[in-house]
Amino acid sequence: MQVIRRLFALWLLVCAGQVFAQARALPDFTHLVDEQGAAVVNISTTQASRRAALPGVPGIEDDELREFLRRFLPRNPDNAPRAESRSLGSGFVISPDGYILTNAHVVADAEQIDVRLTDKREFKARVIGLDRRSDVALIKIEASGLPVVRFGSPSALKVGEWVVAIGSPFGFENTVTAGIVSAKGRVLPEENLVPFIQTDVAINPGNSGGPLFNMNGEVVGINSQIYSRTGGFMGLSFAIPIDMALDIQKQLRETGRVARGRIGVVIQEVTKALADSFGLDRPRGALVSSVEKGGAADLAGVQPADIITGFAGRAVRSSSDLPRLVAATRPGTRAQLEVWRNGAARTLTLTVGELREQRVAARGDAPRGQKSARPEANRLGIAVSELSAEQKKALHLEHGLVVTDVRRDARADLRAGDVLLRLVRRGRQTELTSAAQLERLLAGLERDAVITLYVRRGESTTFVTVAGFAGEG
């Protein structure tokens, strides 16, 4: 019994030692907050706006919560009374003479911007410039000798390391929250120019524009967005890398606007099936589905079906990499483009153009004049016919096969009205000129063959991969 008691006591000591060791391993954020907290500011904005009362929600000010509710409740701006609209956010001082970084959505359209420091001093601020595409804004208060933050390198961040946010969620000034880096280079829908830092740091309305610190007390990002189904924190927060934000603020301070590169291509992701079709070793790069006539890429010789694998000496691992790399390049810069074409790598040189506005490919009507009879489907599960002279003229095409019917067992994601331009198989491209030609090409394919079709759909073009075929191979 005595031996058992000793073993039990020894086990308790070991457990206590492990708990103590783990407790000592937990980070201490107090020095970081003491040293850097004074450079974080609270931002409140006021604007006059027409607004309708929110039914069933009396007494709510027009802050970020009201903005959230307004997206889902009907309103009538023409008959709404004018009222003061208020919103809250955060920011941080980057120079002793009063320059402050924050989010563009915090100060956009504001008629008055009030900045409060941790020592309770308050200042009126003016907007030096803002960039809605990146959600970065630079504002200025008339002050001197202000505490400033230090900057770190987002590229040195490691997934899993501790990070800290300081801000004003729901107006609670100088709130400190902590978490870890969940991912880097995250691309969000409609936000393909910013490689966000994803964290699980608690971020809520009012934190927008505040700093994200590493454990060295250096700012590595600007807290900008959260993913939420409720409007509150759910463990997914996103920050703009500080090196990108500093480049933007420099341009805003110098010129009042941000110049971004553009090369004039429409791209799509390279899947495993597409990589196999084009003879690429693995899924990587950005597949060019169309090239803007007269654009930088067109002048450099880029063609549809090229796979861009590198830009300006940097690898393009996925299609989301290319817009960011190009946008970060100054217009007028000469850059090398690595492309994969017809089963071989080649290098092109282009002069980067300027991105002036977002362009969305228009979706036109499908070609008309098709026969109502239902022709026999081919191995793809579709029926096609050659373009008429009128259709070629209207679509500005020299060749192509229009899809006239898509059966329920179709093997491809095709639609009636699509125009098939090329078939790609093991890196080899074949222009499609007749239904009989397509039949011959399909007849020679094995059951497990993988092909890719270059398709004109409306005013845009895309690549559609087909894997596996009906009938005998």
Image: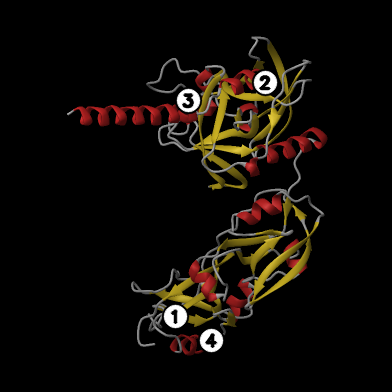
Comparing labels 1 and 3, the label whose residue is closer to the camera: 1
User: Which of the two discs, 4 and 3, labels the residue nearer the N terminus?
Assistant: 3
> Whole-percent x and y of residue 66?
48, 25
Q: Secondary structure at mark 1?
A: loop
Comparing labels 2 and 1, the label whose residue is closer to the camera: 2
- Residue at 50% across / 20% down in the picture? 170
- Give the CA distance from mark 1 to mark 3: 53 Å
For disc 4, the marked residue is: 434
How many other residues sit within 10 Å of disc 4, few (<14), some (14-19) or many (≥20)?
A: some
How many other residues sit within 10 Å of disc 3, few (<14), some (14-19) or many (≥20)?
A: some
Comparing labels 4 and 1, the label whose residue is closer to the camera: 1
Q: Secondary structure at mark 3?
A: helix
Camera sees residue 45? no
- Check the image and report above or below for 338 versus 358: below
Residue furthest to the front: 2
- Give the CA distance from mark 2 to mark 1: 61 Å
Q: Which mark is residue 449?
A: 1
Find residue 313 and report its image quarter.
bottom right
> Whole-percent x and y of residue 174?
57, 18
Say which quadrant the N terminus sits in: top left
How many other residues sit within 10 Å of disc 1, few (<14), some (14-19) or many (≥20)?
A: some
Say which quadrant the C terminus sits in: bottom left
Q: Which mark is residue 39?
A: 2
> Whole-percent x and y of residue 126?
73, 22
For disc 3, the marked residue is: 65
